[in-house]
Image: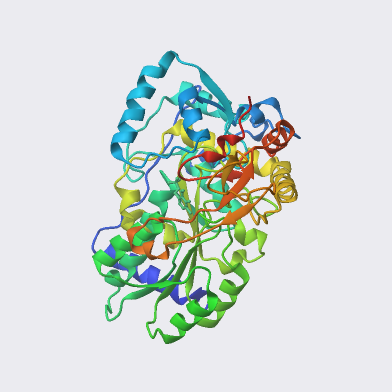
Amino acid sequence: MELIGEKNSWDLWVEEALKNLESKKMFLPLKPVKLTSSGHQYEDKDEAQTKFDQNEYETFNGIQPWDRLAVQISIPESLFQQLKNEIDFTTKNERDEHEKLSSKEQQQEFKKLTLFAGNDFLGLNRHPTIAKAIAKAAMEHGTGPRGSPVICGYTNYHMALESSLAKLKKKEACLLCNSGYAANVALISAIGSVTTLLSAKEEKTAIFSDQLNHASIIDGLTIAQRVGGVELFVYRHNDMSHLDALLTNCKMKRKVVVTDSLFSMDGDFAPMVELAWLRKKHGFLLVLDDAHATFVWGKNGGGVAEEFNCENDVDICVGTLSKAASCLGGFIACSKTWKQLIQIMGRSYLFSTAAPVPLAAASYASVTVASKESWRRIEIRRRMQEFQALTGIPVTSQIGIIRIRFLRCANTRTPNCSAKHCKVTSDFDGSAHNRGCRKAWSNHIQIPKASDSDQQHLQALGFGLLRHFQFPLFMGFALS
Ligand SMILES: Cc1ncc(COP(=O)(O)O)c(C=O)c1O
């Protein structure tokens, strides 16, 4: 990207867009609210940001009983049987029938299962330090204040959380949103607004988006296109030659590349080193959606950019607090000027209530715990190796999209099935980018009925290794 003094061209465009907003009296600053806790009144912004006593955040050196509890669930016996017998609901009537049945099943027997489908990759959802933080903040402050961050929803808790995330991502600033979805929509719509805010509106912004990007990016792009500030180019999934060709042929001045860092439906990483190289070649703004990798990858949990040692090549990094942090919320780590622009032009930010204080407090605790309990990141890698050794299936990340079927030997669908791990198949309907959804990308591992010891071994793979968007057929990993 072209450098003018200390700033690159994107910094200058954003500054100009902000000046334009100011001149139109549309600049909306955040309004930090000082919360009084236990009689303590914060005196100023800086004090409010540093008032969280790190000694309150107890951490542990290894797996504790609550880690196991975090993945234990119960489901009605009848649902378990349906899953086991691979009965899929294909019509609305079948689904309605099942729901009617389930509502009568309040008193019926339940089956204990180990849940691998959640996004709680670090297994933090029962961590006592996070639970204490949410309870304490709720007792001290209730669930308010209620409002958009530019009205009254932005407190010292939110500010502390933003600072800790900016530090984690090694960026100047951070903007909290109430979900990862809202963060992507706010960011992409703000990027789209740059064109319309510049004085010379001669040209749109070119946005290059990976074919398999998350729906929230696609929805942000739809808003940006509607406003008229962007032209969209979709490149084949992780295909850097295709991206390079599209960039080379594009004569537009302002270019952005946006990609998931770790793809939620496939578990593969974006090619970070190649992206960094292309960024140098073409001078685009690189936006990374690090939803699935934040807290999990990189030595400090900084995500994929830290893992691949290219944090300086990522201009803006989106993340979520709803997955490995086990809370709820999203964020955008960026420069101070980008933060200002997004807070005004990111509609899902501006027109939505900020996360309640207890959630911000829990997320702050979670960021602290996740960063200090680095053994969790090591543990995940160990689980990946164990899984690969056990199944022979190569795993590159903590996400594996896998349907597991415990087959009876005479199963008609795979009559020749004799090997333990007999089949991995996949198919993909890649036409879905514009619809914001993926239809079919499914891996099937088909395993003959597993022995008890296999089942126990599979259970021992632990938290967050496997997930599946649709039907959790992996529930073959029954505990009992
Ligand atoms: C890549 C990606 N980005 C963003 C999101 C949205 O995050 P949230 O669930 O916090 O809205 C998801 C959620 O699945 C995701 O997979």
Which x, y percent locates residue 311? 61, 63
Q: Quadrant of the C terminus?
A: top right
Q: Which quarter of the figure has residue 107?
A: top left
The mark total stands at: 0
Nearer-the-camera pick, 146 or 328: 328
From this view, report whether residue 395 is shown above or below residue 94. below
Residue at point 38% right, 23% down? 102
* Residue 221 position within the rendered picture, expressed as x and y whole percent measured from the top left: 34, 63
In the picture, measured across the screen, residue 118 lies left or right of residue 33, that is right
275 over 62 or under it: above or below? below
Is residue 246 shown above or below 385?
below
The one nearer the camera, 268 or 441, is 441
Q: Is residue 265 left or right of residue 215?
A: right
Residue 181, x across and y down, in percent: 40, 50
Q: Residue furthest top?
A: 107
Q: How far from the left and from the top, in percent, is residue 364? A: 55, 39
Is residue 94 visible in the rendered image? The answer is yes
What residue lies at 38% left-to-right and 49% top-to-bottom?
182
| Colour basis | rainbow
Residue 459 occupies quadrant? top right
Q: Is 2 placed above or below 475 here?
A: below
Which of these two is toward me, 160 or 470? 470
In this image, 216 relative to 61: left or right? Answer: left
Residue at the (27%, 77%) spot, across then down: 201
**In this orientation, does residue 1 appear?**
no
The residue at the point 48 percent across, 77 percent down is 243
